[in-house]
Amino acid sequence: MVDQDILIVGGGLAGLAAALYSDPGLKVAVVSKVHPLRSHSVAAQGGINAALGNNPDGKDDSWERHAFDTIKGSDYLADQNVAEMMCQKAIPTIFELEYLGVPFSRFPGGVIAQRPFGGAGFPRTCYAADRTGLVILHTLFEQSIKRQVKFFNEWLVTKLVVKDGRCLGVVVFDLATGQLMPVKARAVIFATGGYGRVYLRTTNAYINHGSGIGIAYRAGIPLKDLEFVQFHPTCLFPKNILITEGARGEGGYLVNNKGKRFMVDYAPSAMELAPRDIVSRAIQTEIDKGNGFDSQYVHLDLRHLGEAKIKKRLPGIREICIDFAGFDPIEAPIPIQPAQHYSMGGIDVNGNCASCVEGFYAAGECACVSVHGANRLGGNSLLDTVIFGRIAGEEASRYVQGSKAEEGEKILFDEALEVKKRIENWQHKDSGIKVHLLLDKLKVVMSEKVGIFRNKKDLAKALEQIRAIREDYGRVFISGKCLRYSQELVNILEFDSMLDLAEVITLGALNREETRGSHYRLDFKERDDRNWLKHTLVTYKDGRPQIKYKEVTLGKYKPEARKY
Amino acid sequence: MEYKFRIFRFDPLQDEHPYFKDFLYETTEKKSLLEALMEIRNNQDCTLSFRYSCREAICGSCGMVVNGNFDLACRRDLGSLQSSLIVVEPLPNLEIQKDLVVDMQPFWDALYKIEPYLFPPEKIEAEGFRIEEKEMEKIFQFVNCILCGCCYSACPVVSRDERYLGPASLAKLYRFVKDPRDKRPYKRWSRVDTEGGAWGCDTVFKCNEVCPKNVRPADGVEGLRRKLVVERIKQFFRFKR
């Protein structure tokens, strides 16, 4: 049996950061369902925030200002102590990334370049053109080669094994062999990313099914604030490929079918650089009012930036427009619409990335620390992955050094056998429902009823429909008999989690009778701090979700109205 | 529009020989090759295997050969192929694991060999490096590489000489050698001063032709050669003195 001191699940930024900062004396391995460089972190574009003050307009920036912007942007749902910690650590983290090899863009004088981003008081987003995720992921992967990190690629984790409140390991499905295997680990770190593909329209990669979050939930770990789903304002129509916030940071305009920069009606001082929740609602409102094009999109106009700036600062965006939509943004405006982009909520962990289960940690998008609260600021997710990935690696190392090796092989084998039986059950059926049809149904429910604008009636209906799809899930089958590289089996296994996540998102949204950050209730349009300044916690117990609430850690920043 | 897809199939554990299987595919919308493959898999044959992830030409998963051309499946619009027959094959010169899924291990092994990471200076400035953008610009071309493996798979030298590191790894090494922050000692990177390294290239530039990200890996190989020659001369005079 594969036996590790620390097993990291996920090879994106958080997973690789965890691996690099785990104690090198321990047996550490990264398990990923794809090669690490194929992780969705690679698609991040615009940048990573740190109050370096390199931009001439950002001389007065400080980590405290960064923390304030993050907390205000979160609509005061972030835990202020951890948000402050992240923003303070941001500055040395950027220099460290640079020493690891990240090729940041520069300003005259040779310092790291910084551009304005949404919801930020100063231009503090460091970037490498518009390929910041690509260069940081490749750099951390390079460092993991240097450090000889062990990788198990194309292994899908199907179960987290917990006994008496302690983590024993996981069960994995090896795509190359089609076999199930128990893997023993004294500590497990989940860095499994988001669940964007639960929605019809998403910027996320095809692989972002969110099964890591669902697996932790089924192991009894609560999910926190899952109703807070970020919709990115500018996604290329109709494929929903991300068009970075950096495009607006560099000066791009949002324009409706009347030629008007409509943000003046929604955020008169921040304009296009209001936080994402506000800009997404503004765009959707314009489209719904009939001010969009083909009732589906508005324009992001970069033409006035000029050819030189677009080629230098936004070459990736230009390439995406040419390759995927057949036009050049130097010559034509970009058709954009909002789409699901990020999960503020996730596996409930504290500032040390530790969960309620001993030896189980989570970091990055799959986790909820919480630093993003009800709405994440652009440029803070890469920061989150690198900082909390590292903390998870360090904390898990500390835990392993102080813990006794656990027996548990028998339990792990039994759990693997149980998963194997489930798979055989799907294989033995000659007919039934194909899982992709259910996924198509679920996505439509989530996009139509649990989207940018929400109300009680739709949310209740969505919950009903999700539970009906759950019934149908009992009738899925595997039509192909060979399990090697069977994407069909991967989808069946992961769909179980997707149903759970859809249910938890919807349940949290239905219960939360207020509007806060990305969670906008048409029937409760105001933020309600008296009743709802608290985290949602949903736990899987007795075969169903149970909902509880937890205090937000407040600090020196008192909740105030969010005006931009 | 109606297409006939002719897709390479092979399960080395079951099939004696690879074969092609035909699928009819109809669509009224603009679709990428990857979207079409996914629909064919979902609706016609769930055992069809291929890799994919980002669907926006940045993760490097879905390199394959389409009507004879190397491409990322996600990036290729079906209409642009201007053919109703679409022949899909896996990346050549790599072992088939199943259908369009190939074993990329030799490609990764080559990458590991060149020590593809920054050798930073010993003295670390607390406030970071001071480097002008035009210094960094020298490496941006190579930083765009997504390690999809198309160039490696297409390279005629790789196909006949297993020692050859291939275009992507050599271009990656050049990216570090040219990085103004990198202090890698000459003896570490001069290991590529061999036929299996920088001198193995045939200069037929197949890599430049097939690269879906316009990295032009051969520029990196040529750059390494120039740099090796210059360093050799420097070393020679240093030795003489």
Image: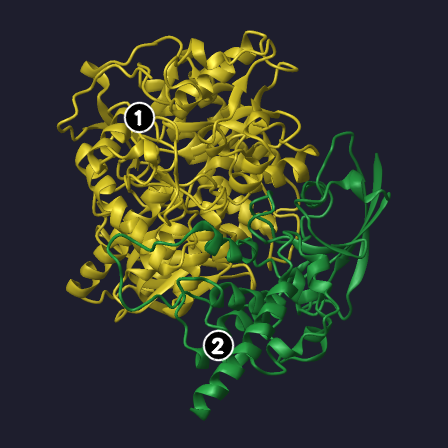
Cα–Cα span, label 1 and label 2: 47 Å
Do labels 1 and 2 touch, CB within 8 Å?
Answer: no
Query: Within 10 Å of the Cα at label 2, are there few (<14), some (14-19), or many (20+) other Cα atoms?
Result: some
Looking at the rendered image, the quarter that the C terminus of chain B falls into is bottom left
Q: Quadrant of residue A271?
A: top left
Same chain for mark 1 and mark 2? The answer is no
Residue at figure coordinates x 62%, y 31% from the top left: A329
Chain letter for the green colouring in the rendering: B
Chain letter for the yellow colouring in the rendering: A
Image x and y of residue B100, in percent: 69, 58
Image x and y of residue B128, in percent: 30, 54
Query: Within 10 Å of the Cα at label 1, are there few (<14), some (14-19), or many (20+) other Cα atoms?
Result: many
Q: Is residue A536 visible?
A: no
Image x and y of residue A221, in percent: 28, 42
Q: In this figure, which residue is indicated by the disc labeled 2?
A: B189
Question: How many discs appear?
Answer: 2
Residue furthest left in the image:
A556
Q: Quadrant of residue A310?
A: top right
Structure colour scheme:
by chain
Chain to which mark 2 belongs: B
Amino acid at pointer 1: Gly
Residue at figure coordinates x 41%, y 66% from the top left: B182
Residue at figure coordinates x 37%, y 64% from the top left: A29
Amino acid at pointer 2: Trp
In this picture, residue A57 sits left or right of residue B110: left
Taking B104 as reference, is A58 above or below it?
above
Looking at the rendered image, the quarter that the N terminus of chain B falls into is top right
What secondary structure is found at the residue carrying circle 2? Answer: helix
Q: In this figure, which residue is indicated by the disc labeled 1?
A: A73
Q: Quadrant of residue A229?
A: top left
